Amino acid sequence: MIKHIFFDLDHTLWDFETNSTLTFRKVFKECSLELQVDRFMMHYTPINHRYWKLYRENRIDQENLRYSRLKDTFKAIKFDADDHLIHLLSQRYIDNLSNETALLPYAKEILEYLENKYKLHIITNGFNSIQYKKLRNSKIADFFNTVTTAEEVQLKKPHPKVFYHALDKAQAHKKESLMIGDNLEADIHGAVQIGMQAIHLSNAENRYKRSIGHLYELMHTL
């Protein structure tokens, strides 16, 4: 029954953690900051997840997301960073992040496997210009018939209107559509609440009833 597959981008196909680490390493070097990137990322990753959740819930805006995640990380590692430095690092991080091209294992192979069987699409809460640049630079843009961003809809997953907008754009029916993503709340619950099917990409314990630990498992599922 499935004719359309909708993917989340960050953490699902595009390796956000690896690409963030590479970007911060480059930015810290450019700014002559002697910081251990691995230690920085150990704190930054959960802090960033927390602020993205606040952003999805419309409790902070884009500017506060970008500033506060760095401010809190520097505080956690006890590094004295003033507002000027934080804004500088934030902008350089954004400018450079989408130049990185690391994908999750088997991402490209899975897309090559699926593209002849289904119409493929993206639904992302990321920002317009950055997400399109990630797709182009990682050389996976051509796999997708449509790309729907939260910025385009002016709402964020898991809001139902984001999924309905993506379905309309793809000319797809929800009963013939499947969502694949890493975020249980935004991707999975968001899709299921409007009647789409969903597969959760996760190794965590809070797995959805239909879950996979690695993308290559889709070859045996779809």
Image: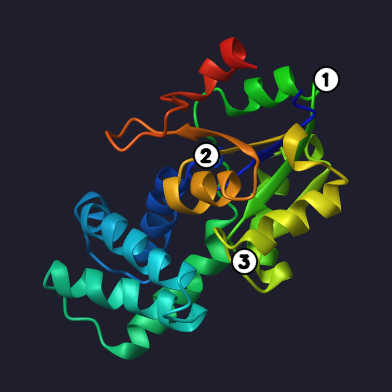
Q: Which residue is mark 3?
A: 127
Of 186 and 90, nearer the camera is 186
Q: Dot 1, how many residues are within 10 Å of its Cα: few (below 14), some (14-19), or many (20+)? A: few
Q: Residue at x 56, y 68 (%)?
A: 95
Q: What amino acid does circle 1 point to?
A: Asn
Q: Quadrant of the C terminus?
A: top right
Q: Residue at x 59, y 56 (%)?
A: 98
Give the quadrant of residue 52: bottom left
Q: What amino acid does circle 3 point to?
A: Phe
Residue 54: give x, y in percent of width and height.
Answer: 39, 71
**Mark seen at residue 116:** 1
Separation of residues labelled 1 and 3 (CA atoms): 29 Å
Separation of residues labelled 1 and 2 (CA atoms): 20 Å
Q: Identify the residue at the far right of this view.
A: 171
Of 186 and 197, nearer the camera is 197
Q: Which residue is mark 2?
A: 12
Q: Earlier in the sequence, mark 2 or mark 3?
A: 2
Separation of residues labelled 2 and 3 (CA atoms): 16 Å
Q: Dot 3, how many residues are within 10 Å of its Cα: few (below 14), some (14-19), or many (20+)? A: few
Q: Identify the residue at the far top of this view.
A: 220
Q: Is residue 14 above or below residue 207?
A: below
